């Protein structure tokens, strides 16, 4: 059963549950890639753990975001879906929405920040979406998105605070645990909380007793503050190389799920993200964007005690501008 929670809105929210993740998995079957789960003897020896890396950097369009985007668009009633959808994103949700819309024959409009990586803007346009640029430091993307949605009659699908987006993201952990068997710990990258919320739903259903921990950048620890305060804490848009986690606050759906299902939230620094990018490139031959390194960095730097444990690690994406990637690793 889904959980009902009271909010400051007129009606209670219906939180997604594991059944919603299972429905998302059925919609995504044969559409999303069942991404490989990789291991590294070097990482295991360095941490004293058995680490299982879910490589969502090898997902369609290069990130887990395709899962939630496709599931959310596919869940819309036919007549509503064909009018088109709008989303706001720094890049990965944008690309996921654009590709999902292309596959489903749905017009997609995306609000993207002016300082989003050029490669992500180009890829979003390449999938056929209309891109509208905005200043993330002076404009409210949610208000702008609602305004355009109302003017054009579009359905707004936000990057994390949407039940079908959350359910779609949860299929990543579902596949990971189906591949590895029960785990002691699951580390998940955290921006707005859609991925960690969905993954926690799947993890607790499939691996009872597991602890789920979210990992966000030091500069943007709003989720950590929120979990400890017991209410949503909003911060200024953080400045970090983890552009996919430059969120100011958790959502009305993601916060209660995190409160209930996530054991803790830890942070890692930008230099630690760079070192993790270097590890993936040199030792595992993987290109991983800074945001995609959040969960792995927490394990490799032992921000989370992992010794002696079986640990799932979600690599959330690999969409990085190659010039920026090379510049970060050369610094």
Image: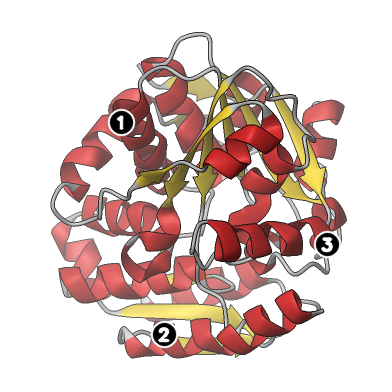
Q: Nearer the viewer, mark 1 or mark 2?
A: 1
Visible residue check, residue 154? no
| Sooner in the amino-acid sequence: mark 3 or mark 1 | 1
Label 2, label 3: how many angstroms apart (C-alpha)? 27 Å
Label 3, label 1: how many angstroms apart (C-alpha)? 32 Å
Visible residue check, residue 19? yes
- Decide: marks 1, 2 in contact (CB < 8 A)? no
| Sooner in the amino-acid sequence: mark 1 or mark 2 | 2
Along the viewing direction, whichever of 83 and 219 lies nearer the viewer: 219
> Disc count in the image?
3
Number of the label disc, if any, that sits on residue 123: 2
Along the viewing direction, whichever of 208 and 77 lies nearer the viewer: 208
Label 1, label 2: how many angstroms apart (C-alpha)? 31 Å
The residue under the point 49% across, 68% down is 92
Coordinates of residue 86 in the picture (x, y in percent): 42, 72
Coordinates of residue 270 in the picture (x, y in percent): 81, 62
Give the residue number, with chain letter if any, for mark 1: 179
Coordinates of residue 190 in the picture (x, y in percent): 64, 47
Q: Quadrant of residue 272?
A: bottom right
The residue under the point 41% across, 82% down is 124
The residue under the point 74% across, 69% down is 241
Number of the label disc, if any, that sits on residue 271: 3
Coordinates of residue 147 in the picture (x, y in percent): 55, 75
């Amino acid at each position: 059963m889904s959980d009902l929670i009271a909010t400051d809105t007129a009606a209670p929210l219906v939180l997604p549950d594991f059944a919603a993740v299972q429905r998302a998995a059925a919609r995504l079957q044969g559409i999303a890639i069942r991404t490989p789960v990789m291991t590294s003897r070097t990482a295991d020896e360095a941490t004293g753990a058995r680490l299982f890396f879910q490589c969502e950097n090898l997902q369609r369009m290069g990130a887990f975001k395709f899962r939630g985007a496709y599931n959310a668009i596919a869940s819309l009633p036919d007549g509503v879906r064909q009018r088109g959808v709008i989303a706001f994103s720094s890049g990965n949700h944008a690309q996921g929405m654009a590709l999902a819309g292309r596959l489903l024959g749905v017009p997609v409009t995306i609000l993207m920040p002016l300082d989003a990586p050029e490669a992500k803007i180009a890829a979003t346009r390449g999938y056929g979406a209309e891109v509208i640029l905005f200043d993330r430091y002076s404009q409210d993307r949610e208000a702008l998105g609602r305004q355009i949605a109302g003017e054009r009659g579009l359905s707004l699908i936000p990057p994390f605070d949407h039940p079908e987006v959350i359910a779609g993201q949860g299929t990543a952990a579902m596949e990971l645990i189906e591949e590895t068997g029960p785990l002691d710990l699951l580390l998940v990258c955290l921006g707005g909380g859609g991925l960690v919320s969905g993954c926690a739903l799947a993890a607790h259903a499939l691996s009872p007793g597991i602890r789920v921990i979210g990992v966000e950048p030091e500069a943007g620890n709003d989720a950590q503050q929120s979990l400890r305060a017991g209410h949503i804490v909003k911060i200024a848009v953080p400045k970090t190389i983890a552009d996919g986690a430059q969120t100011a606050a958790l959502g009305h759906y993601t916060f209660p799920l995190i409160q209930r299902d996530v054991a803790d939230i830890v942070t890692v620094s930008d230099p630690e993200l760079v070192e993790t990018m270097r590890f993936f490139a040199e030792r595992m031959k993987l290109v991983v964007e800074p945001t995609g390194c959040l969960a792995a960095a927490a394990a490799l730097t032992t921000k989370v005690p992992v010794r002696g444990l079986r640990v799932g690690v979600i690599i959330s994406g690999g969409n990085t501008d190659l010039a920026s990637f090379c510049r970060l690793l050369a610094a």
